[in-house]
Image: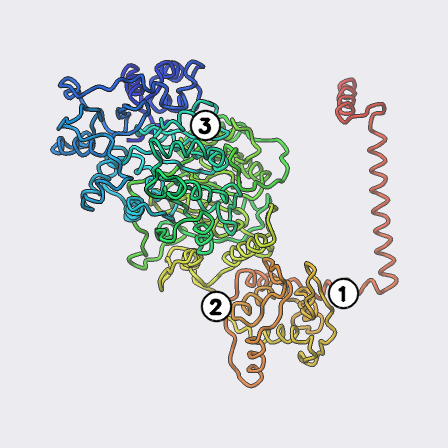
Amino acid sequence: MEEEACAPGSDVSADGLIAELLDMGFDFDAITAAVGAVGPRRGDVLEALLGGSGTSSGAGAGRGMASRGAAVPVRPVTASSAARPQRPAGKGARLSNPRGRFRQSSITDHIASGTAGRKESGREASASFPCSSAPGDPRVAPVGVDFCSGQGLESAGESEQMGRVSAVVQRHFGFSSLKAFQREVLDAWFAHRDCLVLAATGSGKSLCFQIPALLTTKIVVVISPLISLMHDQCLKLAKHGISACFLGSGQPDSRVEGKAMAGMYKIVYVCPETVLRLMEPLKTLAEKPGIALFAIDEVHCVSKWGHDFRPDYRRLSVLRENFSSSKLKFLKHDIPLMALTATATIPVREDIVKSLKMSEDTTIVLTSFFRPNLRFSVKHSRTNASSYGKDFKELIGTYNASRKFKGKEQQQQINVGKTKFGMTLVKENIENELDLYPGVDDFDVSCGEFLECSQPESSGFPAQPNKTSLSECLDQGPTIVYVPTRKETVELANFLCKSGLRAAAYNAKMPKSHLRQVHQQFHCNDLEIVVATIAFGMGIDKSNVRRIIHYGFPQSLEAYYQEAGRAGRDGKMSDCTLYCNFLRVPSLLPNKRSEEQTKAAYRMLRDCFHYSLNTSKCRAKILVKYFGEEFGPDGCHMCDICIDGPPRMHDFKEEAIVFMNVLQGRSGDETEGVIYSSVPHYRSGGRRFGEAPNFRMVVSHIREKLPRFAASDKMWWQGLARILEGLGYIREAAETPRVSMQYPELTEEGLKFLRRSQSEAEPLSAHPDAAMLLAMNDPRPFSDFSEWGRGWADPEIRRQRLAGSRAGRRSRKRERRSRQQQRPTGFTTAKERLAAILSKKKRRR
């Protein structure tokens, strides 16, 4: 059973703990040094050993579990050893090591122990000490059964096969059974087929490649994008009695790589650029003891059409090229590839299979993208410091209300510029930079896959359409707030701390010690809120996150759904709220992209913008449809659209005819008596658009020539253009479409509609989107701007305005001269000038 590092009651006797860790393969000197440093607490000692915080004498074994190597003698089964009391599963099961490498026991050991102790209850019934026996010993089956070779599995029935898997899962992880998609993935591995796994965040994808490491004497190699993710997975596996290591630039012990390539670990985590360097050692490892499979986690990073493309992932096709049976003659089958992700659209899936050169019979395992315990909502906000008070009032009230029983002294301690746990607020002036998707060297967060027994096996639709109010109170739990820039993480975290909450900022430019502290305190529930950029959270291991708030537009629905999926992994109701400015078109964050990737990035951002402006369709339905899943006829009955209902439909026929006639005016057609025949030519990216008018010019023409539309806002007309585009009446003429339409042009369907409108009275009814509703509620009269512009034609008004402008410039020059005169002379640097000013003030006192 897994123990949390911060959970109480984890103290054990020092002698018992040392014996247990020795059985797991750690070096004695490293164990004693770690116990002396952190005390006899299993979780802390394991963290110290895997984190390399032991003394130099144990540094080598602190990272790997294999420094004892072949020094461990092979002991036959004796009466005394058989009579020893059995240790509970998952707390350091003994590892047999006849070859000088640390591997898990074979499945036959678990079967034997399970039948012998079937009458016992609890986990001890399935726990046993794996051991080596003399040839022909009838009590124990051979340890070296290889399930990858197909011998034994093909002859065994399917029920027996799954029974063996269940025994391993029960012993090491405490689960009584596997989920349906996990069984399907294992079936593909048993058949030596490649597999692409798309399963929701927190559903247990990691188990799919961890189980094969326990069913065979071969090694599982896992490619993962973050060192922090690999580090945390290794720590968790060690607590389950499974030897694992990670390789990459974050591995301080240079000897671990050699041990890993000698087969001393059951699971080897490696970052993509490192696996590209280790081709030859991996070939040696594939021959003896063998590689069971290559697992590629977060595989959406492979696709250049995805939201988190990484070039090193794109080069992982070398795994299939170098580890096929045609390339390595000692292989009976190609080493299977297992690709795993939580978010991938249909084009991304196709690109993944093609880029990795996966086989034609690749098994694609899909689970439902629908999360029945997540409530999605979108709210309008300016998303700046002036909006913090209004936007986070409810959140502040929720946390402060739970602390009413606390004394005034403790409440004042929280409010005086420090959080409860003593972390000072960040007061430095951080540039308003963006965190792009983190690289492998970033210590973003120690994270891993959370496998929750209470998680529903399959996400279905609600059994009854009972609507859940958005105001329904959630269980108090942690909150993650995602913001676009590093500066905003500090500003918002400081605001929340001053409001009495335990909050902290997190971004990639902060000190590593601060990031580790934030991560640890967030996982131990000392922090209530983390305000972070996208650097925080890939594979985050915390089940009780109750709220995910995006304070600003994400770059894609894929990224948004992945980040929102970090809430409610315990199956309880959780909120996913997006705050964004409906009246401001989101911008694409800077990154290195090709022309095709830029087009794809704009499409994804545009989809995200349209999702936020939606007022008529269930948000959960939009999200799952984006990933190619049919949701069903009803909505989720929980999102803001399902609860509040859509706005009243409006007939936009008159406005649509005016707008489309202006577009058609370049050919000399009339728009309510106005001839629009002199449309200028436009260029964008070197391509000539002929007579396609600029959108801004179209709106200006309508407001100038038609007085009843003078007060209309450009964003309202953009909303109308989205409606017409959805009906197929207009389209974007630009080669690289932006988030909002720039160069609209009529389609054939649009021309047919204009012709029909002259003889038919058919309405054009639609729901206005969120931007249109805001524009209608707060109109900005265009006539005021027009009159101000015409004022420049009056000589007297022009003279007054120019005189005021000159007076303003003169006053600014006087202020600048005054500051220069006050500056001390003889100093060349700002530091020297500041020192002189301070000393002058001291003399005056």
**Residue at the (83%, 25%) spot, across then down:** 824
How many other residues sit within 10 Å of disc 2, few (<14), some (14-19) or many (≥20)?
few
Q: Determine the secondary structure under disc 1.
A: helix
Q: Quadrant of the N terminus?
A: top left
- 65 versus 441 height, above or below: above
* Image side of residue 754 versus residue 87, left or right: right
Can residue 48 be seen? yes
Q: Position of residue 129 (x, y in %)?
A: 21, 25
Circles 2, 3 touching at the beta carbon (< 8 Å): no
Rounded to the nearest angstrom, the CA distance separating label 2 from label 3 is 50 Å
Residue 787's label in the rendered image is 1
- 404 versus 684 height, above or below: above
Q: Which sits earlier in the primary sequence, circle 2 or circle 1? A: 2
Q: Position of residue 533 (x, y in %)?
A: 53, 40
**Residue at the (44%, 27%) spot, across then down:** 257
How many other residues sit within 10 Å of disc 3, few (<14), some (14-19) or many (≥20)?
few
* Image side of residue 555 versus residue 154, left or right: right
Rounded to the nearest angstrom, the CA distance separating label 3 from label 1 is 59 Å
Residue 648's label in the rendered image is 2
| Front residue (pair 803, 133) | 133
Q: Determine the secondary structure under disc 3.
A: helix
Q: Which residue is mark 3?
A: 410
Q: Which sits earlier in the primary sequence, circle 3 or circle 1? A: 3
| Amino acid marked by disc 3 | Gln
Q: Specify the quadrant of the image occupied by residue 795.
A: bottom right
Q: Nearer the viewer, mark 2 or mark 3?
A: 2
Q: Nearer the viewer, mark 3 or mark 1?
A: 1
* Image side of residue 737 versus residue 263, left or right: right
- 647 versus 184 height, above or below: below
| Amino acid marked by disc 2 | Arg
